[in-house]
Image (cartoon, grey):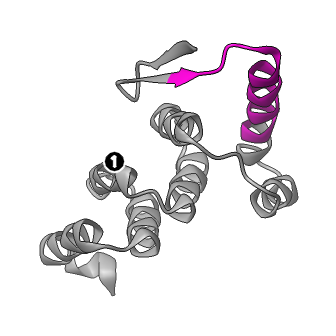
């Protein structure tokens, strides 16, 4: 087993270091490129096909989200994190509620609602108290 460190995520993820893993990661890189496309149809096609899954997937989405320098791309990646439904991303999405861009905060709220659970609800309620206009 090999390991890959994701500095922006602050985690090291174990993986199989064989040809199948490399092929999977190449396909994943191509999928991420389509997700980040400015062409809405390219994005929608990628969004509606079977997604990659596993800890590498979540870590990579978080890294890509943190590196996104525009709200359009960042919002799409936040949406994907919410759709993935992984409770481990709730604190990461909660940090997005502090983003200066209203659109990013809206995507983060949507993702937290999608994930659900006690922790996500707590962050949504805290945000409602701090910025009630975001929830109108």
* Element at label 1: helix
The secondary structure that most of the magenta stretch takes on is helix
Q: Closest to the observer: 77 or 99?
A: 77
Residue drawn at (86%, 59%) of the image? 45
Q: Closest to the observer: 23 or 130?
A: 23
| Percent x, y of residue 48 | 79, 64
Q: Is residue 106 left or right of residue 118?
A: right
| Percent x, y of residue 14 | 51, 22
Above or below residue 66? Residue 73 is below
| Percent x, y of residue 38 | 76, 48
Density class for disc 1 (Cα within 10 Å; few <14, some 14-19, many ≥20) is: some
Q: Is residue 115 left or right of residue 14?
A: left
Q: Closest to the observer: 3 or 60?
A: 3
Above or below residue 123? Residue 36 is above
Give the quadrant of the N terminus.
Answer: top right
Residue located beneath label 1 in the image: 92
Give the quadrant of the C terminus.
Answer: bottom left
Q: Which residues are magenta?
A: 14-32
Residue drawn at (21%, 80%) of the image? 132
Q: Is residue 11 left or right of residue 65?
A: left
Quarter of the view holding residue 11:
top left
Residue drawn at (75%, 35%) of the image? 28
């Amino acid at each position: 087993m090999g390991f890959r460190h994701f500095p922006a995520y602050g985690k090291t993820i174990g993986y199989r270091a064989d040809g199948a893993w490399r092929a999977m990661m190449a396909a994943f890189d191509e999928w991420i490129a389509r997700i980040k496309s400015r062409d809405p149809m390219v994005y929608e096609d990628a969004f509606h096909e079977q997604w990659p899954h596993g800890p590498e997937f979540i870590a990579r989405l978080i890294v890509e989200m943190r590196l996104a320098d525009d709200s359009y791309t960042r919002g799409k990646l936040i949406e994907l994190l919410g759709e993935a439904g992984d409770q481990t991303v709730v604190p990461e999405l909660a940090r997005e509620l502090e983003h200066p861009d209203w659109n990013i905060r809206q995507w983060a709220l949507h993702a937290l609602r999608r994930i659900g659970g006690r922790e996500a609800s707590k962050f949504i309620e805290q945000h409602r108290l701090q910025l009630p206009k975001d929830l109108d």
